[in-house]
Amino acid sequence: MSRNRRTLSSFPAKLGMLLIAAITSISLVAQQAPKPELSEKVSESIQAIGKKIVEEPRDLDGAINDINALLVQVKPDSYDTAYLTQLKAQAYINKQDYASTIPLLETVYQLSKEHKYFGVEQELGIMWMLAQLYVQDAGTEKNAEIQKNKFAKALSMVREWLSKTKKPTFEAYHYAASILYQQATGGGSGAEVDKELLKQAAQECQNALTMSIRAREQIYQLLVAIAQAANEYETATKYLELMVAANPKSAQYWTMLLSMYLGSAEGLPEGSFLRNDAYARAVYTIERAQANGFMTAPQDYQRKLACYFNSGQFEGTVDILEDGLRNGKVENTQKNWELLSSCYLQLNRTQKAIDTLVDASKIFKDSGDLDMQIGYLYYGNEQYQKALEFMKVARDKGVDKNRTASLLFFIGYLHFELKELDEALASVEKALEVDANNQNAREVHRAIKEAIDDRNRNLKKDEPAEKKKATPRLGNKPRTHSNPPNNPENYRP
């Protein structure tokens, strides 16, 4: 899309030379033609004016002043006027004043149409230049409605050119398609896309393709942009596949194709066949690009493993990460080690998930978050003592501040599971100091207190009889939590 827009917007830099060549050819034809003829007064001045326009050092303002002085002396609809006006247009083109050139060329074209001053071929040249100037003018217009009208004017000129020429060209159809695309998308202004105009643009692209034995890549670029604007991603990828097949050594096309597959996958329902198929195509695109020497950076392998992971292909994710983390093809980040551990969990290989995090903790030695995750995994295996050991290591190293309260609560809960009530109470109370609104910690705190009260009552039962008499009755035994939760982070009474 962006490349096509640059193609249209960059043409003014080239337009000066094109117009100089075309208008000079008009001048030569006009001078050689026996009819119509310039008046004697104008004819005598042409050579001097031409030198000011063409020869160095140029005197463009002087030429324009000379032309203006002659124009007031000749008839408005004369050949003199048409000829002098096209010379004036050439001077403004050399000044790169394209806005001033438009009305001059319009005058030349209308006079030639009415009086046949320059002939069909020369008229076609003027029409083509006007179409390009109209597009350039529309591209700089800020008002969306006015811009739309200016694009329409350019399109009308191109279509008139096509209706008059005996030899329609690839370039003309491509230009018509480009203008329609700009109209449909509001010239990049963010306006709502006109899908009917996009259809017309696509048809003009097809017309262009019939004019070329060998397909031109700029047409496929435009067809991709049109399909994208219409949200027809399957069509866009079809044309991009043709582009990479024809240009396998173009890094740009591989990148565009991959972006298209990834973008289409994100727009599909999670877990659906079409989404997983888009991810599979993205992986295939990366592999083909790598075979041609592209997409070999760590971020490209990261995209590849993300495709596997997001489509539920955990074995593929493991294969990339296992090798990539060690040979440098994948970025050696804590997040990637955690992703590898997560994949092992998805494959029900819990011990391998634990071992992966243990390896990661040796690399990222200051990260208590890794030890906290190891503790959770041991807890899931009902290895509470192991879980507690790693949770304490995490506490000592420090974890993200948003997880501190959860960590302290979990340590307390594990002590509770191991019947270490005093340690449990101390840790849960620290958790409540960090987050007084932690409902799980509050409930477990209450359970621990009840358990401690039970323990103390039981201790008193074992005291000598004379001491028991001195102890007042405490009433009914308080309620205890006989079935603690499996996941203390999600604890509910």
Image (cartoon, rainbow, N blue to C red):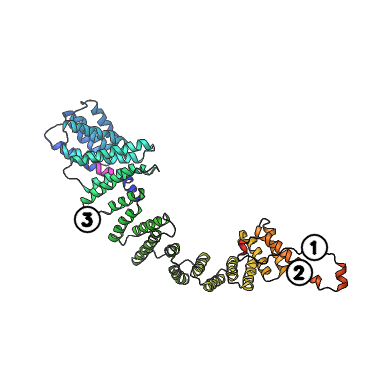
Q: Between 140 and 218, which is closer to the camera in this rendering?
A: 218
Select label 1 or label 3 by which is in front. 1
Tag 1: amino acid: Gly
Could you tell whether 426 is left or right of 313 in the image? right
Q: Between 348 and 130, which is closer to the camera in this rendering?
A: 348
Magenta stretch: residue 162 in it? no
Q: Which mark is residue 475?
A: 1
Camera sees residue 314: yes
Could you tell whether 397 is left or right of 24 in the image? right
Residue 310 percent coordinates (x, y): 45, 62
Q: Quadrant of the C terminus?
A: bottom right
Tag 2: amino acid: Arg
Distance (Cα) linking label 2 and label 3: 90 Å
Q: Mark 2 or mark 3: which comes first in sequence?
A: 3
Vertical relation: 322 (above or below) 179: below
Q: Which mark is residue 378?
A: none
Distance (Cα) linking label 1 and label 2: 15 Å
Residue under the point 40% across and 65% down: 296
Disc 3 designates what residue?
214
Vertical relation: 11 (above or below) 375: above
Instruction: Give the quarter of the image for residue 136.
Output: top left
Q: Does the CB distance between marks 1 and 2 fall below 8 Å?
A: no
Could you tell whether 418 is left or right of 315 in the image? right
Q: Residue furthest left?
A: 34
Residue 206 percent coordinates (x, y): 25, 49
Select label 1 or label 2 by which is in front. 1
Disc 2 designates what residue?
455
**The residue stretch that appears in magenta:** 15-19
Select label 2 or label 3 by which is in front. 2
Tag 3: amino acid: Arg
Q: Main structural element of the magenta stretch: helix, strand or loop?
A: helix
